[in-house]
Amino acid sequence: MKTDFLEIENGRKLARDEIPHLGFDEFRHQALDIVKDGGKVIHYFAYPEGGDMKLMAVLRTDRLLAAGCDAPEAYPSFTAECEPFHIFEREIAEQFGIRPEGHPWLKAVRYHANYRGKPDVFGNDYAEDIPGNYEYYAVESEEIHEVAVGPVHAGVIEPGHFRFNCIGERVLHLEIQLGYQHRAVENLLLNADARRLPIIAESIAGDTSVGNSLCYSQAVEALSSVAPDKGAQVIRTIALELERIANHVGDLGALSGDVAFLPPANYCGRMRGDFLNMSLLLCGNRFGKGLVRPGGVCFSLADEVRNILDERIKEIKPQVRHVAELLFSTPSVLSRFEDCGAVSLSDAEKLGLVGPAARACGMPYDARRCFPTEHYKRLDIPEYALPSGDVYARAKVRGDEVMQSINIIQSLINGPVETDCVNGKIPALEPSSFVVTVNEAWRGELSHCVLTDAEGGILRYKVKDPSFHNWNGLAMSLRDTGISDFPLNNKSFNLSYCGFDL
Amino acid sequence: MFNTLKNRFEQGYRTSAYPKEKIALWRRYRGLPQIHKDASAELAAECADLCPQNAIDPVRRLIDMGRCVFCGTCERISNGAFVSFTNDFEISVAEKEHLLTDGSLPSLADHSRQHFKKLFGRSLQLRQVSAAGCNACEADLNVLATPFFDLARFGINFVASPRHSDAIVVTGPVSRNMKTALLRTYKATPDPKVVIAVGSCALTGGPFRGSPEITEGLDTLLPVDLYIPGCPPHPLSNLHALLTFFK
Ligand code: SF4
Ligand code: SF4
């Protein structure tokens, strides 16, 4: 297929005028062609420049592609023809008041006024509480009952509102309303003093602190032409894998708890803590905050630390393996996991699912393999996917990734790792530039896209958490599933509220 | 069955002896900051200048632990000569002004409210409200239920309904979209109720201060009884605060 979209590289700076600026019709036509042909949307966002609005799309096939255009105030929705654009168009409408005409489900994303003071696309008065002028989907019949849960949930969990339409125990439709965690992170990243940015990036989603600080730091590195040394790349890779392991292990325990099989629930809870403590060993913080900064890392992997890490991993590895074997060989667990909450490959494609949730539906994409950064370029990440799309597949993919990540870390700490630590000062950014950074965080494809203006200030900072794609996957998994299986499905995805809400 | 038992033996007994026995956290952990008064004025000013949270007062030589996210920049820049972090995780306070510290903290036990101890010393039920942080604070509250910390052995539990709770534990900088839900939860909690603010976000807005979508300090909305600093506070900081304040 011939396209004017430019092939770009992950984490490589471009001058902004190198990015093709197409006419709107051409842009629309070509973006739709790429995605209809199996491409995926990494970013599709709007940004203001001079008094004008522009659109930018970053797509992926087996390559990364980018192009932009001038934004009309209203345009024929892409989503009406091609589903993967659905939430991006809603976000653009919410952030800048640009209306995608004919969008099949034009609903607020995070519930805030647009940044341009344009008439609200959703007809909301933001002095009113969320969800404002929005009526949830309702299935109508005398036998239907609705269950409304949240924003404050029964556990120690982030806020969100869930609305189930059920017939008896069976869920016909689940609608998820988020936005309660909205802190306007993208605007903060745009306006705050440069020294605050690493802290803000790490706090977009705390369970993905390392992922977000990597995306941020790689972007700054590209835009200022500083580079981490090899040792720093190894330490960053270890930190990202520790983050993955801790979250996966914790969720396997939570899944086990949800089917009332308590031994793995308790063991995994404890072992997750041990992995968090390994992050603390590296950098003093259990979530890896303070470790990754533009130019490298702030803490070394001195031999003393490396040896302690090695010993701890050696000790815990068989325990993790045995608990996983126990979990996945217990009939009462399997009978609840299997065939529960299946998402079909075709739905997963249309929703644009990413990460383990997508690999559990037969989509093997893994940014560590397809667009590797840091030390992943020198690692061999195998292609891996399971076909069934159910809770079992999501749990199994995550369980297998834990063992794979442990092996990766072990392979990286069997010899000295040397790096010159950075002091955390933030270099100046080059003007009129563009960069996109993509990393495989534990939930999947995480990406930041940064545009600078003619003075080297940040013109647009776009963040995309994998949950931005995947929340609709959870909603889909509940179709025709017992409402009592909601916790199980929820845990198998374990999506981020704050990462979505920004 | 055999597999289940084998795992049980392999896992062993894991519950910590804290608070009976002290725990020494790894030295890279950043707990209570120590200010070194003899550092030069230039160094103090440089640290204050590079602190991402504007948490350092270089003239009075104090750190505001409510703003601080314990990132370690000041310690690194000054090479420990102006600020160094100890591994002391017992850093919670009952009065907001105590968050401003040079490294000496008033004893939390002396400042806890005696009637709370009498009422809740043997049984304390907590309702957690997560309000727009990054979810790491929630995660390190949640781990208190795991075998290592085993909060329930102290008679302290997280409960599902504010109607069953004695205290609300708030994390995050309270976004505009969460405010009503938080205030309603507070209202639904029976009197006398305790309010506990956990993490830099809840204390001052944390990394998100300056955003028009958030609240800079839970105490501007509700009367806060207990402040637990950190980003996030170590689970042991949370445990210490709960045990010292209520037991
Ligand atoms: S550790 Fe605290 S006081 Fe020191 S630089 Fe970081 S935020 Fe500022
Ligand atoms: S205080 Fe820090 S760890 Fe806690 S919610 Fe805020 S950003 Fe996250």
Image (cartoon, rainbow, N blue to C red):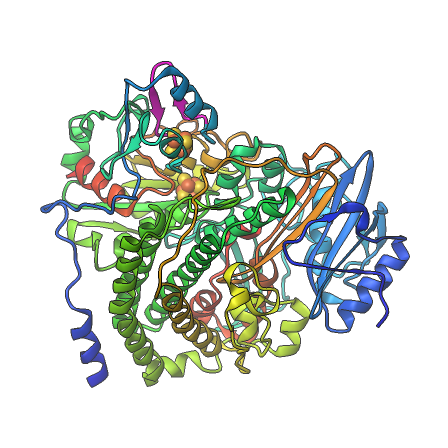
Ligand 2 quadrant in view: top left
- Seen from this angle, which residue lies furthest left? B20
| Residue occupying the point 39% across, 60% down | A242
Residue A307 is left or right of residue A390, and the answer is: left
Magenta-colored stretch includes residue B94:
no
Q: Position of residue A348 (x, y in %)?
A: 62, 72
Q: Is residue B207 visible?
A: yes
Q: Position of residue A18 (x, y in %)?
A: 80, 50
Q: Main secondary structure of the magenta part?
A: loop
Q: Nearer the viewer, residue A190 or A420?
A: A420
Q: Position of residue B173 (x, y in %)?
A: 46, 37
Q: Nearer the viewer, residue A54 or A77?
A: A54
Q: On screen, A250 above or below B42?
A: below
Q: Is residue B218 visible?
A: no
| Residue occupying the point 72% across, 69% down | A39
Q: Nearer the viewer, residue B80 or B199?
A: B80
Residue A387 is left or right of residue B170, and the answer is: right
Residue B116 is left or right of residue B230, and the answer is: left
| Residue occupying the point 48% across, 56% down | A230
Q: Nearer the viewer, residue B112 or B236?
A: B236
Q: How many labels were placed on the picture?
A: 0
Residue A303 is left or right of residue A23, and the answer is: left
- Per the rendered image, the range of residues in magenta is B54-66
Q: On screen, B175 above or below A305?
A: above
Q: Quadrant of the N terminus of chain B?
A: bottom left
**Location of residue A102 by image quarter:** bottom right
**Location of residue A308 by image quarter:** bottom left
